Amino acid sequence: MIALQIYIKGLNDDRVLRPLQLIANLFFEETEIFMNEIDEWDIKIQFEMATAESVKVRAVLLDREGHEHSAAFEKELSENLNEKDRFKQIKNAVSHVFLTVLQEKTGIIQKWGILTGVRPTKLLHRKVQEGVQKDIAHKQLREDFLISEEKIALMQQIVERQLAVVPDLYELKNEVSIYIGIPFCPTKCAYCTFPAYAINGRQGSVNSFLGGLHYEMRKIGEWLKENGIRITTVYYGGGTPTSITAEEMDLLYEEMYASFPDVENIREITVEAGRPDTITPEKLDVFKKWNIDRISINPQSYILETLKAIGRHHTVEETLEKYHLARSMGMNNINMDLIIGLPGEGVKEFGYTLNETEKLMPESLTVHTLSFKRASEMTKNKEKYKVADRTEVERMMNMAEQWTKNHGYVPYYLYRQKNILGNLENVGYALPGRESIYNIMIMEEQQTIIGLGCGASSKFIHPVTGQITHFANPKDPKSYNESYEKYTEEKLMILAELFLHEGRTVS
């Protein structure tokens, strides 16, 4: 496919290239943006900009057919801005007019406006923390970011729900949550880019990996105990954490109880049992033994042909069977994931999946929109995977919204991804009182999340300044096995810098 060429004239700061590229990708499948003059272009956009007490931006778009569109935007610059924040306001103004002229040219309205980031609800949480009145906050989101009324209403509903579920959300900076990554799956799905290795034939790697993970849990737990830091939530992800044996799971949870502080009072412990083909009565017994009752069993779709096409080697019957088995063995907080826009699926197929979900009524339902992640099998071989167009994907999302509303579920978290179909979002719905606290914590970035295990990412958030530091463990088991002690030590050093600051009282 030949990329559409966009020539940008009148801007000389390379830092705006990336945000403009992301916005262009919302409208066209393949684009290239140039700030140096080129002979052949499909679209030329002439910018004029002035910055003093306010930033004024005007843009005129001209296409090869001679059609012209223009837009302008002006915003007063906040006082006493540092260089980084001043540039952010200028970048947003440039993005504002760029999006507007592309909307006029294409007739496609982007309901999320100029936002291309993962966590839009953080913007509204910030307004709440600053004491901005709701109607003023909404007006600012509309004017500054061009977010539609529909998406602002969704953001407001989610923020209110999160604060009802976790009333002390803004006070949890002195606690941490724990993410534990198990990097093994029965097979790798075509859309997946998580660290996930086929478990068959890799038992040596599993044994070595689990030794490193137990070490990390012990050392981190020891430090948290010594310094009086509580754990809010624990989340076992991956991969598929239930790929390992029941005996290995039992030892892992035993380690958690021995190593972590005050485990009985952790607000929530979740285990992704996402692949039904990994669930057994013995593993469910282990969950019961260690008081773990929030699990995920993820059908993704109830169309067998789809499951085969995306590399999920379980049947629809197996999903139903394992769900009922979990229920019969006392699992009373089950999440299920569905994906909108899987290859070959449209409104009819998604409607069938919702009807099947109605027979089960899990406590929570996460509705994902398919994203073409750069390193996935699906992205590398796009021509093999026919997916629905923007209009049909949006219809499916509307079906999910209506279905959840009709069945008593409320939206409580959302996140977005690059290259997501229809420029939509992923939304977590739950029956009231069954929301996942971990999902709220990871999305709203109100506290440190410590990642343990292979491919686990830590996000360290300074309890005073809110500054975020990212830290990632190696993604493959071999590298992890060779270096887990080093990575554990580095995490402990970051934790000490964050939490043992002057003025903090250790309990």
Image (tube, rainbow, N blue to C red):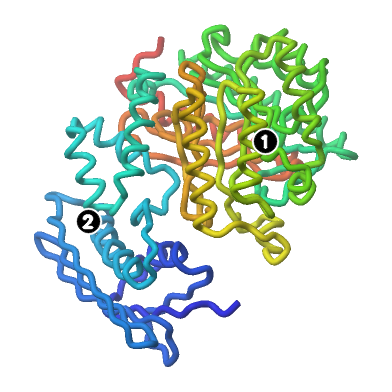
Q: Position of residue 289 (x, y in %)?
A: 72, 8
The residue labelled by disc 1 is: 238
Q: Position of residue 282 (x, y in %)?
A: 82, 15
Residue located at (78% from left, 47% from top)? 305
Compared across the picture, whether 221 is left or right of 119 comes to right
Q: Indicate which disc, 2 or 1, sits on the residue closer to the N terminus.
A: 2
Q: Is residue 180 above or below residue 325?
A: below
- Cα distance between the residues tagged 2 and 1: 39 Å
Q: Identify residue type, mark 1.
A: Gly
Q: Is residue 158 above or below residue 38?
A: above
Q: Is residue 277 above or below residue 113?
A: above
Q: Nearer the viewer, mark 2 or mark 1?
A: 1
Quarter-of-image position of residue 313: top right
Disc marking residue 86: 2
Mark 2 neighbour class, 10 Å CA radius: few under 14, some 14 to 19, many 20 or more: some
Closer-to-camera residue (491/276):
276
Residue located at (67% from left, 35% from top)? 238
